[in-house]
Image (spheres, helix red, strand yellow):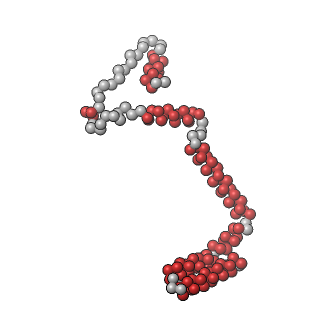
Amino acid sequence: MIAETVCSAVSAAGLGIAAVTAYRKRFLAAARIAAYSLVPVGLVMTGVVGWLADTAFSPTAWAGFVLLGGAWLLFMTTRAIERRGGGTRKERKAAKAAAQRESVAPAASAPSLGQGSRPATRPAATPRATGSGDDFSDIEAILKKRGI
């Protein structure tokens, strides 16, 4: 009840100021002031003011606002840590290795004219060793090729 009365008084005062401004031949400013002064009455008529008054004095609503603020704080904290390069060591190592692999572009210096412009040389396949060391020699070759 008090909030509705205050909003009505603010609107009446705003309309009075708009009338004085229009009397001074500043019609654009007077129309703008009148528009601003009609907002509180519109809020009262739609019920927003009553809802806000009920929410302001509700402990449940305040607890909800506190929970929303905590969730927002957790979200922003995790985003900040993520941007600073946080995370586990495995994630950082994987990201660093991926960045090194992507930074090397072997075909970047060749013009994009199609298949004919690429060099036809391929690296020779490493000969496989016979015996029980087959699997490990392949792994060693792959690791050497990657520079590990």
Residue 96 position (above or below residue 48): above
Q: Position of residue 71 (x, y in %)?
A: 65, 53
Q: Residue at x 45, y 17 (%)?
A: 137
Q: Residue at x 50, y 83 (%)?
A: 27
Q: Residue 13 lies in what quarter of the image? A: bottom right
Viewer-nearest residue: 51 or 27: 27
Viewer-nearest residue: 59 or 119: 119
Q: Position of residue 23 (x, y in %)?
A: 54, 87
Identity of the residue furthest to the top in this view: 131
Identity of the residue furthest to the front in this view: 24
Q: Position of residue 84 (x, y in %)?
A: 58, 42
Residue 65 position (above or below residue 38): above
Q: Residue 131 lies in what quarter of the image? A: top left
Instruction: Name the side, left or right, on which 56 lies relative to 33.
Output: right
Q: Position of residue 56 (x, y in %)?
A: 70, 68
Identity of the residue furthest to the left in this view: 116
Q: Residue at x 57, y 33 (%)?
A: 90
Q: Residue at x 43, y 35 (%)?
A: 103
